[in-house]
Amino acid sequence: MEEESVNSPVLVHKVLFVFAGASHSVALLSGNVVCSWGKGEDGQLGLGDAEDRLFPTRLSALDDHEILSVSCGADHTIAYSDSRLQVYSWGWGDFGRLGHGNSSDLFSPMPIKALQSMRIKQIACGDSHCIALTMEGELHSWGRNQNGQLGLGTTEDSLVPQRIDAFRGLPVKMVAAGAEHTAAVTEDGELYGWGWGRYGNLGLGDRNDRMIPEKVYLVRDVSVSSLTPYCFRYLICPKSIQDKVMGLVACGWRHTISVSSSGSIYTFGWGKYGQLGHGDFEDHLVPHRLDALQGELISQISGGWRHTMALGNDGKLYGWGWNKFGQVGVGDNVDHCSPVQLKFPEDQKIVQISCGWRHTLAVTEDHDVFSWGRGTNGQLGHGDSSDRNVPKVIEALSIDGTNGHQIEAPRIDLLSGGFTSAEITWITPMKKYAIVPDKNVHLQANALRGNGNELSVPENDVKRMRM
């Protein structure tokens, strides 16, 4: 597809936020400009085709839509326009994760009719499900639901957004989505978890799934071994381990991170690769304070597939967990089970972070964007497919760099008032995937995806493999 430069007249757009999916990246720039790069096979870049992009490319279909926020799922993307009160989605559509009432893929943004006119505060995307938080504190969920991650009390997928009634009268202020689990913090600072819980990633003291949100109680100043099943079930716990007020929550693929109002960080769930940061490689079934960062006031958190990032209010960034591709960003490819501080040129302060499955993005106070980790699909934005184990500035998005305002855009002309069916490319799942019996899925998945130890999926789950 022919692409054109948009550097005339010269207008420098500063990067405000970055967002990372499984193997793609998105940036929101000043002037409501959206750029995407990396893997495009399923349309997750929104550029009208299935091509990868090695450099940030302007998503011109959203020009003049005044996009306020973006969220990346594994292979799909969501954007919200505050002025239009409209949510847009595109990318891989299997299991209804795009919210359009079907399971087709979309290669260009399309408005989600069920969310029209809603005032959206935040949208969280998991692997195959999404949660929208309204300004009124309500949650609406859609997509895959085989483990109850939608919080609707069933395990049926939902092709369109549905309100989570469990939070009726209990306003939510933040929500996060993992692979198949979800977490939320209420306005009162209470933490809830639901969905897939096999690794303890719900923080409820066991490995069971939950189909409706359940309150999490934080463990501190007490040995886990002293907690009885009765204590967890009936929430009759010593005062010393009662919950603190939570301010933030984030989900990795199968682990969860939360931050208290005092800035202390807690982690729980899958710990095989050190992603919990407690100095071990064990699962933790209840929230544990990360003592290695005690004294640091944590302002942001983000979880990847098997790694974690935490940003202090002083601009210092810490990473830990799985590091095969350098996604922790500390100059090696060794897993780290405790936080390690990252180094940036001239000790630049970081203001925003986002973890993909195997790569990481960060924005500095000078609006530069750094990326590191897996680069096989161009998700690092450096014009190649190389991995990097230390942060490298994305020159195409750098204000000080020669390419700071030379971001190209594909020739896509979508109607500003909405998208018609003639302008949308739909790909149904059956055109792309073959149903593979469970007993063969691991063998075929290994052949298709490479390293077999990177694949971890729930049992008794129907798989769709690319044809």
Image (spheres, helix red, strand yellow):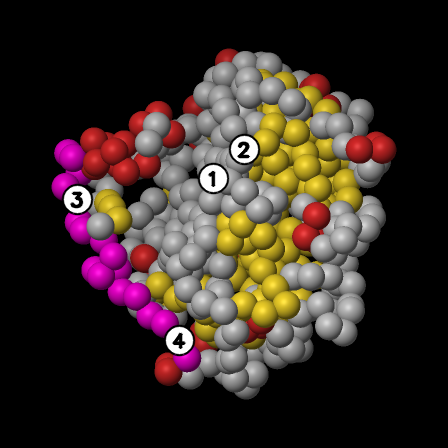
- Label 3 is placed on what type of residue? Val
Q: Dot 4 surroundings within 10 Å: few (below 14), some, or many (20 or more)? A: some
What residue sits right under mark 4 in the picture? 424
Q: Is residue 238 visible?
A: no
- Label 4 is placed on what type of residue? Ile
Residue 166 place in picture, x, y as percent = 47, 56
Q: Is residue 12 visible?
A: yes
Pick the front one: 266 or 398: 398
C-alpha span from label 2 to label 3: 31 Å
State which mark lies toward you, 3 or 1.
1
Q: At 63% from the left edge and 56% from the top edge, which residue is drawn?
A: 27
Determine which of the numbered discs, if any, sits on residue 436 in the image. Answer: 3
Mark before the other along the chain sequence, 2 or 3: 2
Q: Dot 1 surroundings within 10 Å: few (below 14), some, or many (20 or more)? A: some
Determine which of the numbered discs, if any, sits on residue 376 in the image. Answer: 1
Mark before the other along the chain sequence, 4 or 2: 2
What residue sits right under mark 2 in the picture? 387
Determine which of the numbered discs, if any, sits on residue 308 in the image. Answer: none
C-alpha span from label 3 to label 1: 26 Å
